[in-house]
Image (spheres, grey):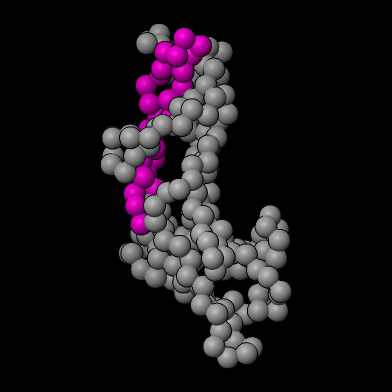
Amino acid sequence: MFPKDFSSRTGFIFALVILVFFVCTCARSQQMLSFGWDPSPDTNVVGYLVEYGTESGVYTSQVDVGSSPQVTITNLQEGANYYFVVVAYETNYVQSPPSGELMVTMPGTISITPPINPGAPYTLSFPMAPGHWYEIQSATTIGAWQTLWQTPVSDDYEWAEFEDFMSMYEPQCFYRLVLH
């Protein structure tokens, strides 16, 4: 175990920056969650473990991110609740107590409906989870994302729908959904 004052020396203040995004095309959807934290100031810390699962306090998966204070976790199931904690470790793999738990509800995949009539917009729809708001972003090349629309904070599990009038003029368009 770490010395008794380990947790106070590390000053783990997890400034979690959550970027959940979904890159969608008609053929395939990829879901992932990225977040980071303030690194420990303790010079004995050499790495971090991110533990997670679908039940609070029960972490069935683990990712060793080494000394990086951030992680991207892929292959998360839509509609599932995930619970995450971060644990620091020393050279001899002695672990700190876990951080506070972070709970994230993964929304579903964006459904993209092409227009029936020429000149009509594409319709994007997706399920929302209570307590979150979302951004739909688009790009003609991946990496050049622009926000098209933002939802208000959701009060319930509901579906959001957005009509994209701009992307119909592009030869190709990528979409991603950002959860806040």
Task: Residue lying at the far bottom in this picture: please name it.
Answer: 117
Task: Residue 122 in the image: state x and y as whole percent.
Answer: 57, 79
Q: Quadrant of residue 87?
A: top left
Task: Residue 178 in the image: state x and y as whole percent.
Answer: 53, 57
41 up-or-down from 27: above or below: above
In the rendered view of the protein, which quadrant contains the N terminus? Answer: top left
Which residue is drawn at the image coordinates 51% and 55% (left, top)? 30
Read off the magenta span. Answer: 79-104
**Is residue 12 in view?**
no
Task: Residue 107 in the image: state x and y as whole percent.
Answer: 41, 58
**Is residue 82 in view?**
yes
User: Is 152 on the left-hand or right-hand side of 117?
Assistant: left
Magenta includes 65? no
User: Is 11 on the left-hand or right-hand side of 172?
Assistant: left
Q: Nearer the viewer, residue 53 or 163?
A: 53
Which residue is drawn at the image coordinates 58% and 91% (left, top)? 117
Which residue is drawn at the image coordinates 40% and 19% (left, top)? 96
